[in-house]
């Protein structure tokens, strides 16, 4: 199927839904899906962003700014996954329990407010990694993954986003803060805040992808190898080490392989 054919098919799917609540994170995929829905359905689209302690301050700001830029109504919905012990136990199924709770709340909100469907932005590339959260989408009624259903790849989404003038077209891929935790470390608001602070500190020196993987007392920092010289400078290294120790880490390490998406899943695959 050509890119044009995929776009036509997406238009057909969105039209058939009539009114849509987009599960909106402000990332590449959900922003593209939001714009696609707006082009087809106009004001029968609303953006709904789940709000909990697993969202970073930068993600919150980005979602607000993008919603304003696109001119689409936007609401924040407080979700309660942190009250679910199956989620906070941080097993390999953590994403499943989180998505089940979050999407369940979004579906209920959509029904109460007159929206026929919730849509979320999974794409074909997401099927290549361990994504238990996608199982939750399949199990729930009232939510669809139109980009995945049509067969859009990440690069196709980026290409169309650039063509449409969306600022997210070249935005680095992102994941929630929980993805930084080694399995088995209890998920708490305090740990989420610790990771958020650590990554914010390192972003003072690095412009690309930054991940601080939380291994209890050890912080494993992932950045692009091209940015190693920036953090190995004596002044930067001192600021990073002292800063991360101040917020609770005992040891600060650099992963010599550099940034890798889903690296916490290495032992599962």
Image (spheres, rainbow, N blue to C red):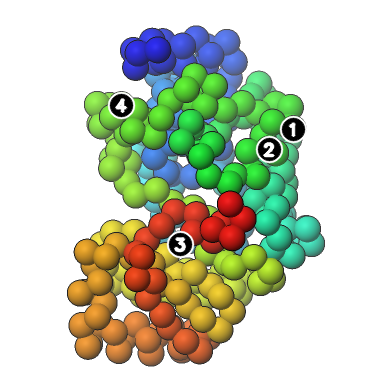
- Quickly name the residue at label 2: 135
Work out whether 250 lies above or below 108: below
- Report if the CB atoms under discs 1 and 3 are less than 8 Å apart: no
Q: Position of residue 102 (x, y in %)?
A: 67, 45
Q: Position of residue 215 (x, y in %)?
A: 56, 75
Q: CA distance from mark 2 to mark 4?
A: 27 Å
Q: Is 23 on the left-hand or right-hand side of 226?
A: right
At numbered mark 1, what does the secondary structure look like: helix, strand or loop?
A: helix
At numbered mark 2, what does the secondary structure look like: helix, strand or loop?
A: helix
Q: Earlier in the sequence, mark 1 or mark 4?
A: 1
Q: Earlier in the sequence, mark 4 or mark 3?
A: 3
At numbered mark 3, what does the secondary structure look like: helix, strand or loop?
A: helix
Q: Is residue 250 visible?
A: yes
Depth check, mark 1 against mark 3: the one in front is 1
- Report if the CB atoms under discs 1 and 2 are less than 8 Å apart: yes
Question: Is 126 or 66 nearer to us in this picture?
Answer: 126
Q: Is 20 on the left-hand or right-hand side of 211?
A: right
- Quickly name the residue at label 1: 139
Q: Which mark is residue 57?
A: 3
Q: Position of residue 219 (x, y in %)?
A: 48, 78
Q: Residues within 10 Å of mark 2 (few under 14, many from 20)?
A: some
* Picture residue at 40% right of the left edge, 12% below the top: 1
Q: CA distance from mark 2 to mark 3?
A: 28 Å
């Amino acid at each position: 199927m050509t890119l044009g054919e995929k776009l036509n098919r997406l238009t057909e799917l969105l039209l058939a839904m009539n009114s849509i609540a987009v599960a909106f994170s402000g990332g590449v995929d959900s922003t593209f899906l939001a714009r696609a829905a707006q082009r087809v359905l106009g004001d029968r689209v609303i953006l709904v962003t789940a709000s909990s302690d697993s969202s970073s301050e930068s993600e919150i700001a980005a979602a607000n700014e993008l919603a304003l830029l696109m001119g689409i109504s936007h609401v924040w919905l407080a979700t309660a996954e942190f009250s679910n012990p199956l989620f906070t136990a941080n097993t390999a199924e953590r994403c499943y329990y989180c998505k089940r709770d979050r999407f369940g709340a979004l579906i209920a909100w959509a029904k109460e407010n007159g929206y026929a469907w919730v849509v979320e932005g999974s794409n074909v590339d997401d099927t290549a990694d361990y994504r238990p959260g996608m199982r939750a989408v399949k199990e729930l009624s009232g939510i669809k993954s139109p980009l995945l259903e049509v067969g859009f790849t990440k690069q196709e989404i980026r290409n169309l986003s650039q063509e449409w003038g969306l600022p997210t077209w070249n935005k680095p891929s992102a994941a929630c803060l929980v993805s930084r935790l080694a399995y088995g470390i209890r998920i708490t608001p305090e740990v989420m805040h610790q990771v958020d602070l650590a990554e914010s500190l390192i972003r003072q020196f690095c412009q690309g992808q930054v991940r601080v993987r939380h291994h209890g007392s050890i912080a494993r920092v992932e950045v692009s190898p091209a940015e190693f010289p920036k953090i190995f400078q004596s002044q930067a290294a001192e600021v990073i080490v002292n800063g991360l120790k101040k917020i609770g880490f005992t040891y600060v390490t650099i992963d010599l392989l550099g940034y890798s998406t889903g690296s916490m899943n290495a032992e599962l695959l």
